[in-house]
Amino acid sequence: MRLMKCNKLIVADRVLADVKSKLKLARIETSIDDWWIDLYMNGRELGYHIKGWVSCVGDNNSMRFMCSFSENRNSDHIVVYCELGESSVFNEWGITNQPSEKAYQEAKYFPPDHESQAAAYIVQQIKKFMREVKRK
């Protein structure tokens, strides 16, 4: 008997590997220790979810970064859902890491086999988040 990963997770594996590589090359400096990679599943979409969280000094709120990515359930395209902002925004995401309605509306789609473009977009969003954190 041979066990194989489902194809949809293979696409997400490639994107995640490229994100990690691009982050290393970009040498993004962060004092944030609270970064997680988790699974993301929404129907036929199966992939990964990246979370970043930081408490803002002198502020009762915190800043959060949420990003889920996978092969799209209706095509072979890669879909990326990202959202960043104050922590209250993310109550909608829930424990399954399903994006909020806003994140669904602002989803980015990349053609099949363009994992590098999807990864570049995710890294761009992480950099944007880090700039926001520095401003707080």
Image: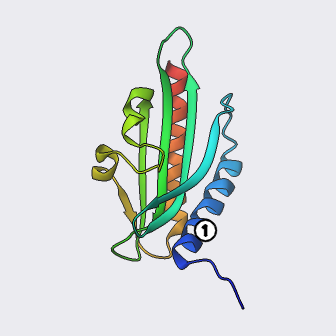
Question: Residue 131 placed where, x, y %?
Answer: 52, 30
Question: Residue 48 placed where, x, y %?
Answer: 55, 57
Rendered residue at 67%/54% (across/down): 20
Question: Residue 13 placed where, x, y %?
Answer: 61, 66
In this rendering, the answer to whether 62 lies above or below 47 is above
Rendered residue at 62%/49% (across/down): 37
Drawn side of residue 34 relative to residue 74, left or right: right
Question: Residue 122 placed where, x, y %?
Answer: 51, 51
In this rendering, the answer to whether 16 lies above or below 26 is below
Q: Residues within 10 Å of mark 1 (few under 14, many from 20)?
A: some
Quadrant location of the N terminus?
Answer: bottom right
As drawn, the residue found furthest toward the front would be: 1
In this rendering, the answer to whether 79 lies above or below 136 is below
In this rendering, the answer to whether 93 lies above or below 48 is above
Q: Secondary structure at mark 1?
A: helix
Q: Which residue is mark 1?
A: 14
Rendered residue at 68%/83% (across/down): 3
As drawn, the residue found furthest toward the top would be: 58
Viewer-side residue, 43 vs 57: 43
Please name the amino acid that badge 1 sits on: Arg
Drawn side of residue 31 relative to residue 51, left or right: right
Total of numbered circles in the picture?
1
| Rendering quarter of residue 42 | bottom left
Rendered residue at 40%/35% (across/down): 91
Q: How is the image coloured?
A: rainbow
